[in-house]
Amino acid sequence: MSGPTRTRRLVSPSPEETHRLGVKLGQLLEPGDFVGLVGDLGAGKTHLVRGVAEGAGVARSEVASPTFAIVYPYDGRIPLYHADLYRLADYEELYATGFMDLLGEGRAMLVEWLDRIPQAAPRDFLRITLRHEGEDARSLEVEAFGARPAALLDSWLG
């Protein structure tokens, strides 16, 4: 994988702001977009995902962690897959789930724990790394790989 096309870094002072950032991203997602999330437990991935799903028109009550299901589909303004790779050991195990068949199916995809199996990402994608910056604050390092992800990043964070 070559380096990112574009990067941005920002600090979210609260879980509510992380959620709002997710809502804004979700409003901009289009079918085919792939967003990979990286960060330790408690880094804010779930707050961001819930916001993205809300912004994509998914009812709050539908958004759950797909840890045991691996991939969970949502229907909203756009169809959305939410995947969690935490419990998978390697690419072969991911491949056996049928995950790779879901790529390019006309849905946007959010993938938590992308760092565990980075080859799950397509060539063009957005990677968001969340880190603790204190009790409630989180830093977000956003890297766009490819033209569409770079345009998405620019629309999202300016």
Image: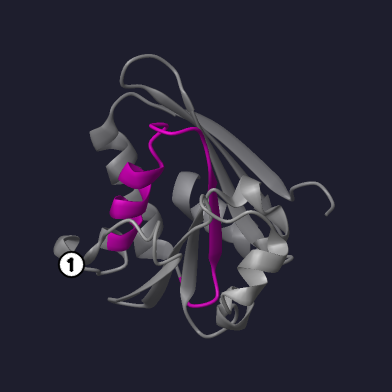
Q: Label 1 crowding class (10 Å Cα cut-off): few <14, some 14-19, many 20+?
A: some
Up the image or down, 120 lies above or below 51; here it is below
> 122 above or below 133?
below
Residue 124 shows in this picture:
no
User: Which residue sits at x=63%, y=60%?
Assistant: 125
Name the secondary structure under disc 1. Answer: loop
Q: Is residue 56 visible?
A: yes
Q: Residue visible at 59% across and 77% down?
A: 103
Question: How many marks can you see?
Answer: 1
The image position of residue 77, as x and y in percent, is 30, 77
In reply to whether residue 43 is colored magenta, the answer given is: yes
Residue found 53% across the figure and 55% down from its top: 85
Residue 107 higher or lower than 92, as above or below: below
Instruction: Give the image quarter of residue 124.
Output: bottom right
- Type of amino acid under label 1: Ala
**Is 124 displayed left or right of 77 in the figure?**
right
Q: Which residue is mark 1?
A: 59
Q: As drawn, which residue projects farthest toward the right?
A: 2
Q: Residue at x 44, y 18 (%)?
A: 133
Q: Position of residue 144 (x, y in %)?
A: 65, 52
Q: Which residues are magenta?
A: 30-53
Asked if the stretch drawn in magenta spans residue 143, the answer is: no
Residue 126 lies in what quarter of the image?
Answer: bottom right
Q: Residue 70: x percent and y percent? A: 46, 65
In the picture, the quarter occupied by the N terminus is bottom right
Is residue 48 rendered to the left or right of residue 149? left
Q: Give percent across and percent down for residue 74.
A: 32, 74
| In the foreground, 104 or 146 | 104
Specify whether 96 is left or right of 76: right
